[in-house]
Image (spheres, rainbow, N blue to C red):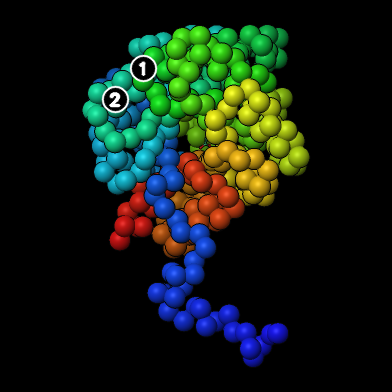
Amino acid sequence: MSFPTHRPRRLRRNEALRGLVRETKLSVSSMVYPMFACPGTKVRTEVSSMPGIFQQSVDQIVEECREVAGLGIPAVLLFGLPEKKDALASEAADPRGPVQRAVEAIRKAKLNLLVITDVCLCEYTDHGHCGVIENEQVLNDPSLIVLADAALSHARAGADIVAPSDMMDGRVAAIRRRLDENNFEDLAIMSYAAKYCSGFYGPFREAAQSAPQFGDRRSYQMDPGNAREALREVATDLEEGADMIMVKPAMPYLDIVQKVRERFDVPVAAYNVSGEYSMVKAAARNGWIDEQRVVLEILTGIQRAGAEIIVTYHAKDAARWLKA
Ligand code: PBG
């Protein structure tokens, strides 16, 4: 039952045929665009390792959100750079912080755009870790209180979804409880459930000024060698009340995306992170790869692995290319 009866090339003869039988059709409706909000006005500073990505004050964020919504991208993911960092991440829950003000301003602009906020402490701590520190140890339970405070402040500002990325144990339950106690029972949680300790976050740490000042994140983020552990992480986050879960980074962890997709019946997101973006940009700038082809191939691969939501810095370009 093989050649010459079967000729797979029959269905590849022209674009109409290929389109008809294509299993994965990349769509802008699954994309989320990450953005970095900073203090001030009229600030728009390009991140040197992430061409096309900016640290922006709230007024500029709103302008870019208008463009994002116009391109048909359904959601943005907001990160914040505070005025001042301290040991306890005091500004993480500040109602006048850049993220909280950006959420309010986007809401006020009445854009057709979902606003997701990243909930973490590393951008707000002077030591750069994702939790509270004692004797150079990241403490789990005391961090939960600060994370829940931050999530509640995002909810009050009008966020549609909060996305904890810190990898403390029990943070989803702590955030869910705090939101429910404050009548935000309808606000969804997208947890970064399987977040690996990855070298691919390098450029992000420039963008968010969040590099740890000592040590690394190995005591809370996952070891790259582990796959079964990712399923346990997802299961616990779902038990704690997560509505959607995320795998991060995307490209080196597509097996995890696929396993999670097969095992759990909840929306799965994958984060095509900063280092993945920067590598493509650098190679494209050198003329070594065709950026458009490579980006659409990467995003298709992530979707084919099973992610229905893709967080990507390429979202605006991809939206334009998919429209053309
Ligand atoms: C905060 C956070 C990080 C990223 C998203 N949320 C950095 C980190 O864990 O060091 C990385 C995103 C990217 O690289 O694009 N904890």
Q: Which residue is drawn at 45% across and 12% down?
A: 183
Please indicate, yes or no, whether residue 86 appears anywhere in the rendered image. Answer: no
Helix, strand or loop at label 2? It is helix
Against 147, residue 252 (above or below) is below
Callout 2 crowding tier (Cα within 10 Å): few <14, some 14–19, many ≥20:
some
Residue 135 lies left or right of residue 54; in this view the side is right
Which residue position is annotated with label 2? 107
Q: Specify the farthest residue to the bottom.
A: 4
| Proximity of marks 1 and 2: CB atoms separated by less than 8 Å | yes
The answer to whether the beta carbon of the residue marked 1 is less than 8 Å from any atom of ligand 1 is no
Q: Which residue is drawn at 55% across and 17% down?
A: 175
Sequence-wise, which precedes: disc 1 or disc 2? 2
Specify whether 252 is left or right of 68: right
Tell me if 161 is positioned left or right of 237 in this view.
left
In percent of width and height, residue 112 lies at: 29, 36
Amino acid on which the number 1 mark rests in the picture: Ala
**220 lies above or below 315:** above
Q: Residue 124 carries which label?
A: none
Q: In which quarter of the image is ligand 1?
A: top right
Where residue 323 appears, as percent x and y from the top left, is 31, 57
Can the viewer see residue 19? yes
The percent coordinates of residue 192 (x first, y second) are 58, 31
Between 200 and 301, the residue placed more toward the observer is 301
> In the image, what residue occupies the spot 58% across and 35% down?
245
Quarter of image, res 57:
top left
Who is closer to the viewer here, 99 or 280?
Answer: 99
Which labelled disc corresponds to residue 157?
A: 1
Question: Helix or strand or loop: what does disc 1 sit on?
Answer: helix
